[in-house]
Image (cartoon, grey):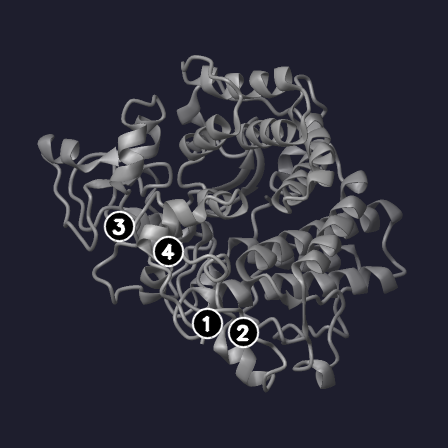
Amino acid sequence: MIQLTVSCKKDFLELTPKGTATEENFYRNETEVYQGLIAVYDVMQWGTTGGYTMKQPLMSAASDDCWAGGGNASDQPGWVAYDNFNMDSRLGPQVGLWSKNFTGVNRANIILEKIDKATTLSTTFKTRVTAEAKFLRAYFYFDLVRFFGNVPLIIKTIPTADLYTQTQVAPAAVYAQIEKDLRDSYPNLPAVVANGEKGRISRGAAKALLGKVLLFQNDNAKLSEAATLFNDVNKVGNEYGYSLLPNYADIFKPDNKFNAEVILEIPHSTLAAWGDWGWVNGGEGNVGTQFVGMDSYNGDTYSAGWGFCPVTLSLVNVMKTDPRFVTSIIDGAALKTAGGTYNARYQNTDYFIKKYAPLKAYRSNSGTAELNWPIDEIEMRLADTYLMEAEALVRSGGSAARALELLTAVRARVGLTQLPATLDNIYNERRLELAFEGHRFFDLVRTGRAVSVLGPVGYKAGKSEYLPVPQQEIDLTKGVIKQNPGYN
């Protein structure tokens, strides 16, 4: 993603940007429209709207891969509530996730409307920016529908009189709009993004997200198309330049951003030198990195963090003999043996997330270091789409040989032997290959395994699939917005 430098603190219901430039007098030329587009991208970086709700570590805590952790059960009570599925309309991470994604939707809607009315934009510019804005709206709605189910479907800016009259629609309608936006988007995006624009959306990213959206709907009639889309992204010699990196650990190195395996990456940097704890989203750093680090750590390699997301022993036990363990998980006991020290915090297991850990070599020397970690978030990469294509093929009765080829490629990259391409093997590979990358909880829900895996820690069918709707949304709309089933 382009290095984002435009940040506007704005609730999703606010229709005009703050500052001297207003909606009416901005967007006059390509430079201003491009700045507006960057403001839409900017929301992807946000993780602290309405509390600390950085998606990757939060979703690890919601899954069986991590506990919530932190100082105690009251440190981040929303995380602990999600960890044990004890949320209610006022307790949980829902405020941040709702407001972030609707902010993104609103900003995308503004850009799309301004572009549609503009008369000074070149056709090439207008076509690409429209495609990017539609992708981004689809991206934000994909999170909204997965987190909340029934949500308002807003595809244009809202008149002030209608702010609190927006009713929810069923997930099927939201998915239909997401599909439409992505189908409109990908033909008009470049296959390869120029070096100076890394991070802007490519055609491959839009096709991969559309395939993922089709797969997540669990509609057998859509699985063949999903497999075809993934195949276009995954095939050797594809036009997008994607390939599995030979060395698994290289994927996550902070100095190897936008590598050949990455399809969608959210960048973070130290460039803003941010120091405002009151509004962390104004910076460009990854606060999730600070969260997962070992509390008060003193030793080699790592910088101190806050002790969230200790890794569960269930994941440790299945990964201990896997070659990806050493890249994915920090063995705290081994660090102590080598002379390191750290504080054991709430739910401590002595195992910590390594993929996105705070590294001394990348600690910012300007601004507040804890707010400025330059560790990117990888949202989609080729091994992910390999495994999704394999799954779609198996579930749709497609080529068993191709499914086996894909699963084998992911395993062979780390020196593992071939296994049959069964759904169980594919799902298990996703857990190990993609650990801590934000996929596990949604994978459990969409494949019907959440009750058996997460039931012992409080997950309930018919309720825990979705977060509660923020109570403030229900109150502001005087009950027009309805609460999700099972919550009060």
Q: CA distance from mark 3 to mark 2?
A: 36 Å
**Amino acid type, residue under disc 4 in the picture:** Leu
Q: CA distance from mark 4 to mark 2?
A: 34 Å
Q: Residue at x 55, y 80 (%)?
A: 474
239 in relation to 289, above or below: above
Residue 329 as seen in the image, left or right of residue 274? left
Q: CA distance from mark 1 to mark 4?
A: 34 Å
**Amino acid type, residue under disc 2 in the picture:** Gln
Residue 124 as seen in the image, left or right of residue 165? right
Query: What residue is disc 1 on?
Result: 487
318 in relation to 277, above or below: above
Query: What residue is disc 2 on?
Result: 483
Closer to the chain start, of discs 4 and 2, is: 4
Q: Residues within 10 Å of mark 3 (few under 14, many from 20)?
A: many
Query: What residue is disc 3 on?
Result: 305
- The answer to which of 347 and 403 lies nearer the viewer is 403
Q: CA distance from mark 2 to mark 1?
A: 7 Å
- Location of residue 170 by image quarter: bottom right
Q: Residue 288 has which mark?
A: none
